[in-house]
Image (tube, rainbow, N blue to C red):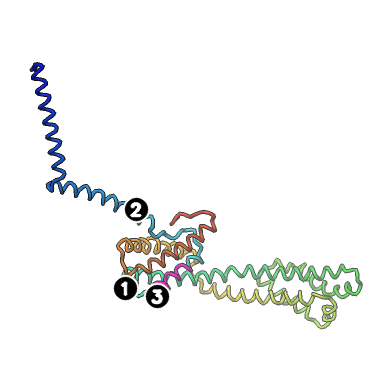
Amino acid sequence: MFLKHGERALAFKRAVFCAGTVGRALNSLFKRKTCAPIRYALRLKGGGYARRKNNANMEDKRMNKVVYGIKNTELDGLTDSLVRAFKADEKAQGNSFLSANMAALEEQSALITTAILQDKALSTLDEADSKRDGAITSLGAVLKGYAAFPIAAKKEAAAPLLAVYEKYSKAGITKAAYIAESSMVESMLGDFAADSLKDHIAALDGVAQAIAAVREAQDAFTAASDAYTKASASKGASASSYKKPILALINDKLVPYLNAMQIADDADIREFAKVAEAEITRVNEAVAKRNGKKSAAGE
């Protein structure tokens, strides 16, 4: 349908009037109480955004898990600290979930402590043998030095002593098995204790001390050997075998639960959670410092 010029102008004015009326009506609608649900929804949306930001901040501050690069001794120390902190917190002890899992952690802590002591006893035997070999070698060096001394009296005093030493050196005293070496050392020390050699030893500075060092090293090896035998008789699993279950208990049960309770603002576990977070952070930082970088939790 085609409108004349005057009719088109009139239609345009009516359209402008209607548009303005609708605009004012909508503007009034948003100001009236009838639009309160809409305004509430908008505020709710804004509040939800704020809560999401708060939740994100809480996630950033959550307790971290224990890094897998932790040493067995460090893990043992951490479990001991957590158990002590829990036993000192009466409020936290009232939580049944924590009580059950901390009891399990205490049991694992005792096992890894025992295993570490056993592993240490086994590893010290080689160290004791190395020190014994070093003492024997030093004695030989002293005697050989006197044997090459330009003063005749010193050379003569050293000759019978060096003969005793070389008898056992040629027999491979420092290369023999533990038991065989111990037998040879005791025999050599017996030879040096002969009355006929006392004056020779007294005439040479440092020889008596070198022989005494061999005696001391042999006694230390004997003690280490006894500890080794005792540990071998009662040896259970190695310390490393307890590492995985302990980390699983802490990282998969305790840490997630404590994080959840912190979000819920559970006053009963608040202090224990702070102590646990501080202890875990301390050991994680020690591992990171040792490795020169931060380790990924659980890796």
Which residue does the numbered mark 3 point to in the structure image?
Answer: 88
Label 2 or label 1, whichever comes before in sequence order: 2
Q: How far apart in space, not on screen, are marks 2 and 1 (Cα)?
A: 30 Å
**Residue 192: quadrant of the picture:** bottom right
- Find residue 154 and report its horizontal and vertical position in percent: 88, 73
Membership of 86 in magenta stretch? yes
Type of amino acid at the residue the image marks with label 2: Ala
**Residue 124: quadrant of the picture:** bottom right
For discs 3 and 2, the disc positioned in front in the rendered view: 2
Rate crowding at label 1 as few (under 14), some (14 to 19) or many (20 or more) other CA atoms within 10 Å. Answer: few
For discs 2 and 1, the disc positioned in front in the rendered view: 2
Label 3 or label 1, whichever comes before in sequence order: 3
Type of amino acid at the residue the image marks with label 1: Gly
**Total marks in image:** 3
| Picture quarter with the N terminus | top left
Membership of 196 in magenta stretch? no
| Picture quarter with the C terminus | bottom left
Q: How far apart in space, not on screen, are marks 3 and 1 (Cα)?
A: 12 Å
Which range of residues does the magenta coloring cover?
A: 76-87
Please, what is the dominant secondary structure of the magenta stretch? Answer: helix
Q: Secondary structure at mark 2?
A: helix
Type of amino acid at the residue the image marks with label 3: Ala
- Find residue 176 and report its horizontal and vertical position in percent: 69, 68
Badge number at residue 56: 2
Point 44% across, 56% down: residue: 297
Badge number at residue 94: 1
Point 46% across, 58% down: residue: 67
Tell me if 226 is positioned left or right of 271 in this view.
right
